[in-house]
């Protein structure tokens, strides 16, 4: 049998130690020897929330296939970490349970509006005191016995989705290269240019949807493609609109989505 080298042994020892520590913490929490807390880490910022604080931040939420639960919106907890959401996006999160189970979610900015820390009730005691619930994602991402959520931040981007799948992610520099001056709008990217960059044409679009970072959505028929734009907002106005905003000429401004993070098109079958 091949002898294990020190380079192989050391990582194995570290992994075993982490597993033991996680297990001990888990059983201590189960026995009530320490208070259950959930740590939220965003970049260099860190907050630890007690069950009392989570209850105080909770609202009643209708969770798909489960019913009404008391849940703390994850976005509200993240906001307490001092991040400027007018110019910074949450690109990825990793949720960890007390038993060591973990799941990571890319394009976190698309799922934040449906992410909650739900407080377990008598009907679901196996959840532990807190479970991460994310509407729109498989329940395998709904981490039980939640103890930590870590976020990776990054610059603002625009996610272009086609029939539910990400086709391309545009950064601000790429959008600027596609922008033109539009009377009444300023520097803007015609939606037709985004379609061309992803191999589509206006004739392919059946439904057009704009999505904001707060989950606000605005839906249009595909015939509006030639009147639709993505506005590049002046930095001095980011606190009001964010770096990007949608616009459809002729449509009420209430349908123009601020803090735009995604455009989704449904193609003709």
Image (cartoon, rainbow, N blue to C red):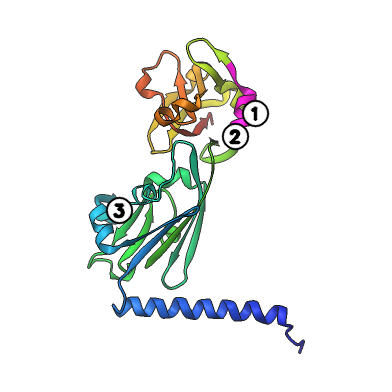
Q: Which mark is residue 170?
A: 2
Q: Is residue 43 above or below residue 189?
A: below
| Local crowd size for mark 3, using a 10 Å CA cut-off: few (<14), some (14–19), many (≥20) | many
Dot 3: what SS?
strand
First in sequence: mark 2 or mark 3?
A: 3
Q: Does residue 176 show up?
A: yes
Magenta span: 172-180
Kindly identify which residue carries mark 1: 197
Rendered location of residue 248, percent (x, y): 45, 19
**Left or right: 73 with respect to 236?**
left
Q: Is residue 7 above or below residue 74?
A: below
* 264 or 107: nearer the viewer: 107
First in sequence: mark 2 or mark 1?
A: 2
| Residue 242 sits in quarter | top left
Q: Is residue 138 above or below residue 187?
A: below
First in sequence: mark 1 or mark 3?
A: 3
Dot 2: what SS?
strand
> Badges 1 and 3: C-beta atoms under 8 Å apart?
no
Question: Which residue is depicted at the point 28% across and 54% down?
Answer: 71
| Residue 125 sits in quarter | bottom left
On whether residue 38 falls in the magenta region, the answer is no
Please tell me whether the stretch drawn in magenta is mainly helix, strand or loop. helix
> Badges 2 and 1: C-beta atoms under 8 Å apart?
yes
On whether residue 174 falls in the magenta region, the answer is yes
Q: Which mark is residue 68?
A: none
Kindly identify which residue carries mark 3: 72
Comparing marks 1 and 3, which lies closer to the viewer? 3
**Left or right: 69 with respect to 86?**
left
| Local crowd size for mark 1, using a 10 Å CA cut-off: few (<14), some (14–19), many (≥20) | some
Question: What whole-number distance in Å separates the C-alpha atoms at marks 2 and 1?
Answer: 10 Å
């Amino acid at each position: 049998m091949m002898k294990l080298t020190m380079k192989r042994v050391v990582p194995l020892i570290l992994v075993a130690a982490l597993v033991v520590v996680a297990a001990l913490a888990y059983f201590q929490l189960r026995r009530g020897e320490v208070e259950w807390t959930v740590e939220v880490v965003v970049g260099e910022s860190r907050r630890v929330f007690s069950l009392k604080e989570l209850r105080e931040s909770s609202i009643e939420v209708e969770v798909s296939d489960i019913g009404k639960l008391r849940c703390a919106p994850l976005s509200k907890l993240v906001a307490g970490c001092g991040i400027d959401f007018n110019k910074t996006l949450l690109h990825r999160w990793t949720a960890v349970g007390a038993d060591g189970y973990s799941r990571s979610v890319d394009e976190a900015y698309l799922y934040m509006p449906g992410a909650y820390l739900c407080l377990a009730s008598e009907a679901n005691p196996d959840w532990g005191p807190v479970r991460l619930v994310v509407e729109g994602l498989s329940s395998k991402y709904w981490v039980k016995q939640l103890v930590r959520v870590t976020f990776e931040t990054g610059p603002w981007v625009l996610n272009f989705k086609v029939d539910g799948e990400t086709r391309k992610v545009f950064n601000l520099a790429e959008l600027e290269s596609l922008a033109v001056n539009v009377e009444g709008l300023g520097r803007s990217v015609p939606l037709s240019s985004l379609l061309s960059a992803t191999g589509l044409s206006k004739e392919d679009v059946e439904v057009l949807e704009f999505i904001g970072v707060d989950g606000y959505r605005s839906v249009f028929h595909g015939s509006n493609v030639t009147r639709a734009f993505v506005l590049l907002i002046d930095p001095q106005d980011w606190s009001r609109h964010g770096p990007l905003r949608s616009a459809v000429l002729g449509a009420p401004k209430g349908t123009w989505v601020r803090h735009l993070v995604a455009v989704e098109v449904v193609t003709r079958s």
